[in-house]
Image (tube, rainbow, N blue to C red):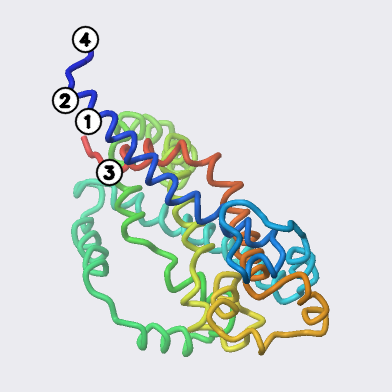
Amino acid sequence: MPDRSIGRRTFATLNGLLFVLFSLSCVVPMIHVLSVSLSASSAVNAGEVTLWPVKATLKSYEYILNKSEYWTAMGVSIERVVLGTFVSMLLTILIAYPLSKNKASFKHQSAFAWYLVVTMLFSGGLVPSFMIVKYTGILDSVWALVLPGAVSVFNVLLLSNFFRGIPKEIEESAFMDGAGHFRILARLYLALSMPILATLVVFIAVGHWNAWFDGLIYMNNQKNYPLQSYLQTILVQSNSQVMTQQYAKLMSMVSDRTIKSAQVFVASIPILCVYPFLQKYFISGIMLGSVKE
C-alpha cells in the first residue's frame, strides 16, 4: 500500500517542484535565445525582450541562411559527428569485447583493463597531444577532431560490463555451431546490446557536436572550424572582423545579439530533433551497463 503520510507527500511535492525548477532552468534560456533571434534590434538593444519576441522579424535568419561561413562550419560538424561516432563506436566495441572475457578466455585481460584505467587518471596534457596531432600529419583536418578522443575508457567499461551480463551459454552454443569471435560479436553481442549501444551513440554524437576547444587548437584555417568553434569565435571576438555589405544593409532590423542568437538556436536544432528519440535508452542503457551480476 502506498505511503500517504504527510512527510512522504511533502517530500514528493518538494521533489516535483525541484524537478520543475530544474527543467525551467534548462528550457527558459533557449526560449529567451529564440525570442531574441526573432525580435527587432531596437527592442533587443532596449532590453524589452524576455520570453516573447518583440516586433517579430526573420531578418536574422535571412542573414545566416545567406552566410556561407556558417553553413561550411555546419558541414564540418556534421562530418565530424558522423565520422567520429562511427570510429568511436567501432573502436569501443572492438576493445570492450575482449575485455568482457574472463582470464581463462583472455589471459592478459586484467593487464589491458588496468592499462585503460590508468589513462582515466593521468593525461599527457595539451602540449603533447598537440605535438602528436601535428607530427602524425592530421593537423587542420577532420581527423584531428576525431582520432585524439576516439576511445573513451568510460564507454569501454560501460559496454564491457554489459557484455559480461550476456549468458555464456549462448556464446558456447554459437562456438559449437562453428561461429568465430567476429561472427559472435556481430550476430550475438551487438544484437543483444541495442540499449547500451544507442546510449553510447548519443553520448558520442552529442560530445562531438558540442565540442569547440579542439577545433580552435587543431585547426589553423578558420574554414575548417566545426560549428561550435565558429560560434565561439563570433560570440567572443569582435564582429567587426566579419562584417559584410549585406550585414550593413540589415543593421536597421537586426543587431549582433539577434544574429548571434539565431546562429546559436539553429546550431541546437539537430540535437533537439534527434535527442528525444534516443532519450529512452539513456536510463536503461546506463543501468544495464553499470551493474554486473
Q: Earlier in the sequence, mark 3 or mark 4?
A: 4
Near-viewer residue (8 or 92): 8
Cα separation between marks 3 and 4 = 31 Å
Residue to which mark 1 is pinned: 11
Q: Quadrant of the N terminus?
A: top left
The answer to whether the residues at label 2 and label 1 have Cβ atoms under 8 Å apart is yes
Residue type indicated by callout 1: Phe
The three-letter amino acid code for the residue at tag 4 is Met
Counting other residues with Cα less than 10 Å from the Cα at mark 2, is it few (<14), some (14-19), or many (20 or more)?
few
How many marks can you see?
Answer: 4
Q: Earlier in the sequence, mark 3 or mark 2?
A: 2
Position of 55 compared to 268: left or right?
right
State yes or no: discs 3 and 1 in contact (Cβ < 8 Å).
no
CA separation in Å, label 3 and label 1? 28 Å
Indicate whether 154 appears above or below 189: below
The amino acid beneath tag 3 is: Ser
Q: In percent of the image, x 62 and y 51: which residue is there? A: 52
Label 3 sits on residue:
290
Q: Residues within 10 Å of mark 4 (few under 14, many from 20)?
A: few
Contact between labelled residues 4 and 2, with CB atoms less than 8 Å apart: no
Please name the residue shown 48% across and 88% down the image: 134
Disc nearest the viewer among 3 and 4: 4
Identify the residue position indicated by label 4 in the image.
1
Q: Are marks 1 and 4 in contact (CB under 8 Å)?
A: no
Relative image position of residue 292 (x, y in whole percent): 23, 39
The residue tagged with tag 3: helix, strand or loop? Answer: helix
